[in-house]
Image: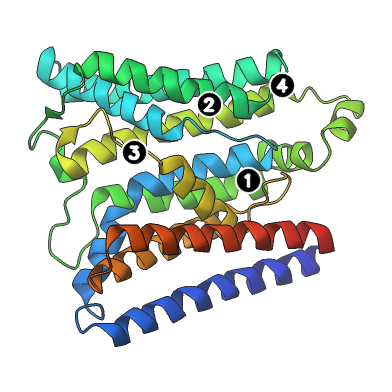
């Protein structure tokens, strides 16, 4: 069984790498500027925020939940960071801690309400999407706060072909999260809960702390992503990350995480993020207009969802 699982894992990753390679080849042949180290650096240093959000989403999807508030939670965390730095002249470390705390509180609220009150996470997180976005606009007075170069080094590479600290941190989180998911009791219980929650309950395991923790992890990663997002743009924007929940879900599904729970890999999600980032960067390099980019990206997401549904039907 373990050999079969390892083989499936390897084949799935190989397939994602092939897709990534085909996209790179297509865009490389379509424009002279794509096959450059600078392009690799641009892609890598643009994805830390999405990577972290997608990792958190992976844990939530695996337990058969969903978090539609990740974009708003990111924006709220970013707004808290900007407000403390600019409006209240607080130390950078305190502002960073506050941003992560805001994200974790949003995640805890999502988890506790959906799990303890037995309300579908779709409804709870949809509500949080509006609440967090409204709080973001209140904190910022619906104005973009320019934080300048205070935390900019987090997202800036030392040279055009090097990776930023934010990207290196995101990769570290991917590796650590993959280990947690596959090699710890918490990760295995999350997979078991997503596969058959009733069976887990009947075996005497309290599923509540595991499900709530998955949402809290997602919130924490959104908080950190908010810091990276603000550092990348040097601003705390009340409209930041609108629609990021769709990109995060798409990265998860492209990576093979099931929308029905019980199946997923953080490393595969990271490859899904790279595929989305390569697609968007390549289309921009070719000069494709934003409406066409949205149509193409949406089509890729739809294909991934259909593929997931077919896998569920045939498995």
Residue 241, numbered label: 3
Residue 126, numbered label: 2
Q: Which of marks 3 and 1 is in front?
A: 3
**Count of picture labels:** 4
Q: In this view, does 194 lie to the left or right of 139?
A: right
Residue positioned 64% across, 69% down in the render: 12
The image shows residue 98, relative to residue 271, as above or below, that is above
Q: How far apart are marks 3 and 2 (CA)?
A: 15 Å
Dot 4 lies on which element?
helix
Which residue occupies the extreme left position in the image?
148
Q: Which of marks 4 and 2 is in front?
A: 2
The image shows residue 57, relative to residue 141, as above or below, that is below
Q: Position of residue 218 (x, y in %)?
A: 50, 33
Query: Quadrant of residue 13 in the image?
Result: bottom right
Residue 208, numbered label: 4
Q: How far apart are marks 3 and 1 (CA)?
A: 26 Å
Residue positioned 44% across, 46% down in the render: 173
Q: Distance between the residues labelled 1 and 2?
A: 26 Å
Q: Nearer the viewer, mark 4 or mark 1?
A: 4
* Mark toward the start of the polypeptide (3 vs 2): 2
Q: In which quadrant is the N terminus drawn?
A: bottom right
Q: Position of residue 253 (x, y in %)?
A: 59, 54
* Mark toward the start of the polypeptide (1 vs 2): 2
Q: Kindly indicate whether the residue at mark 1 contacts the one at mark 4 (C-beta within 8 angstroms).
A: no
Q: Position of residue 45 (x, y in %)?
A: 26, 56
- Judging by the rendered image, the residue that carries numbered circle 1 is 181
* Mark toward the start of the polypeptide (4 vs 2): 2
Residue positioned 38% across, 67% down in the render: 279
Dot 3 lies on which element?
loop
């Amino acid at each position: 069984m373990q050999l079969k699982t390892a083989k499936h894992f390897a084949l799935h990753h190989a397939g994602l790498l092939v897709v990534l390679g085909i996209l790179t080849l297509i865009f490389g042949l379509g424009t002279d500027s794509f096959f450059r180290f600078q392009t690799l650096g641009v892609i890598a240093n643009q994805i830390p925020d999405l990577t972290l959000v997608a990792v958190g989403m992976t844990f939530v999807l695996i337990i058969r939940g969903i978090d539609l508030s990740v974009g708003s939670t990111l924006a709220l965390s970013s707004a808290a960071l900007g407000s403390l730095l600019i409006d209240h002249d607080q130390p950078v470390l305190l502002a960073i801690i506050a941003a992560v705390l805001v994200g974790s509180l949003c995640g805890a609220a999502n988890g506790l309400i959906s799990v303890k009150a037995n309300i579908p996470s779709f409804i709870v997180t949809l509500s949080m999407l509006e609440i967090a976005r409204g709080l973001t606009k209140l904190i910022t007075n619906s104005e973009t706060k320019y934080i300048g170069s205070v935390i900019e080094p987090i997202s800036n590479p030392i040279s055009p072909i090097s990776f930023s600290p934010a990207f290196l941190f995101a990769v570290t989180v991917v590796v650590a999260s993959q280990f947690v998911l596959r090699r710890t009791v918490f990760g295995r219980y999350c997979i078991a809960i997503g596969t058959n929650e009733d069976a887990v309950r009947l075996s005497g395991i309290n599923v509540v702390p595991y499900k709530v923790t998955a949402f809290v992890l997602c919130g924490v990663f959104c908080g950190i992503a908010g810091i990276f997002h603000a550092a990348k743009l040097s601003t705390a924007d009340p409209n930041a990350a609108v629609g990021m929940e769709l990109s995060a879900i798409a990265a998860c599904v492209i990576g093979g995480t099931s929308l029905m729970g019980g199946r997923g890999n953080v490393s595969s999600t990271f490859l899904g993020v790279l595929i989305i980032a390569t697609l968007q960067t390549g289309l921009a390099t070719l000069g494709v207009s934003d409406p066409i980019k949205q149509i193409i990206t949406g089509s890729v997401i739809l294909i991934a969802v259909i593929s997931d549904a077919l896998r569920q039907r045939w498995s």
